[in-house]
Image (cartoon, rainbow, N blue to C red):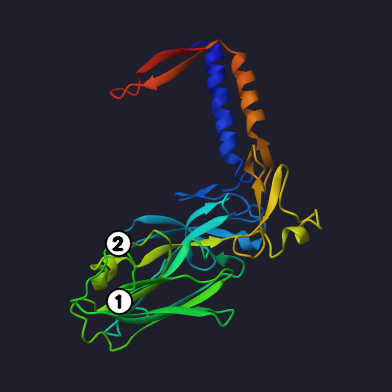
Amino acid sequence: MSLSALHFKLVLLVCTAAAAAAQTKRGCEDTCGNVSIPYPFGTSKNCYMNERFFVNCTTTTTSSGQATTSLIYGTNLPVLDISIDPPELTFSDNVSKHCYNSKHGFPWHSIWFRNFAISNTKNRFTVVGCDTYAHFRDLNSSFMTGCSLSCTSWTRFEEGACSGVGCCQTNFPEAIMNYKITLKSFDNYTDVRNFNPCGYAFVAKEGSFNFSHRDLRDLGNRTQFPVVVDWAVANQTCHEAQKDPSSYACKQNSICNGSESGIGYHCVCKEGFTGNPYLFGCKGIYASAFRTKLLFLTFKPCLFVYMRALHSALLALLTPICF
């Protein structure tokens, strides 16, 4: 390997690593398990923007001795994904379950978000059962919605769709931060428990649940579903936030957008720019590409691509790609 080729390969590695680290403050955890942690979120002091963006990376040990690492938001919400654009946090929420034998199941539960809103465009309230009714209630207002389901073993169910027969889905308005699900039965599943011993209710990311008549028996043993939250920087409009440059979160080459949920604002890179708009600002895509081209032209006109043979980790093949 020539010295210039080695130099070029090292430069590429350094640039790639810097680009990946640019999503997180220096010295801060950038992943927890298989979940990336982009700023403004963080797991320790000085790594997150403010307390609303604190997430906790925890490791627990199962009864079999296996260690599991999880990213937790709030007191006990397992985080599955965090994205900057769109500004979303996806967590795993429990299924409410009510059975003919009241010793089994959890007929109600609630979720509390002090600062973020449950996405009303990415999630659906879903109820499954044949002797079941359930309510979804906003704990900060008088809003309530729900479903009522009644069917028999002779009912023709539509596979793959919540059509109102054995399965119902309904929407809810924007700006809901806290909700409670309540689940009950009309007749304690007396006439349906041979094929539907329990009813189920849950909020789930759209597309994460496809109904089958087999779900009436045990919901496929699923106990959790992903839920999408719209996060925002502060409970201010863009106009209000821009009045105070010291606290305004959008850095260089980014713009302010109102949150989809109607609460607060978030930042996005301007067209032609990329990066984390909350951390170092956004960099020009075309300018970066031009600088990379100039860097490349300082080396030989042929790029050697190193491909490792499958049968030996020690064998490398040099394949010249000339320009």
Determine crowd level at label 2: few under 14, some 14-19, many 20+ residues with C-alpha closer than 10 A.
Answer: few
Seen at 44% across and 49% down, the residue is 34
Determine crowd level at label 1: few under 14, some 14-19, many 20+ residues with C-alpha closer than 10 A.
Answer: many
190 vs 230: above or below? below
Seen at 38% across and 15% down, the residue is 317
Q: Position of residue 97 (x, y in %)?
A: 34, 77
Q: Which residue does the numbered mark 1 point to in the structure image?
A: 129
Q: Name the one closer to the observer, 130 or 303.
A: 130
Image-based side of 184 in relation to 151, left or right: right
Seen at 71% across and 53% down, the residue is 249
Q: Amino acid at mark 1?
A: Gly
The span from disc 2 to disc 1 (Cα, nearest Å) is 15 Å
Q: Which mark is residue 320?
A: none
Q: Which residue does the numbered mark 2 point to in the structure image?
A: 160
Q: Name the one closer to the observer, 103 or 66.
A: 103
Q: Position of residue 222 (x, y in %)?
A: 32, 65
| 2 or 1: tag closer to the N-terminus | 1
Q: Position of residue 91 (x, y in %)?
A: 47, 61
Q: Amino acid at mark 2?
A: Gly
Contact, mark 2 vs mark 1 (Cβ under 8 Å): no
Q: Name the one closer to the observer, 254 or 309.
A: 254
Residue 230: name its quadrant. bottom right
Image-based side of 104 in relation to 319, left or right: left
Seen at 62% across and 67% down, the residue is 115
Image-based side of 35 in relation to 47, left or right: left
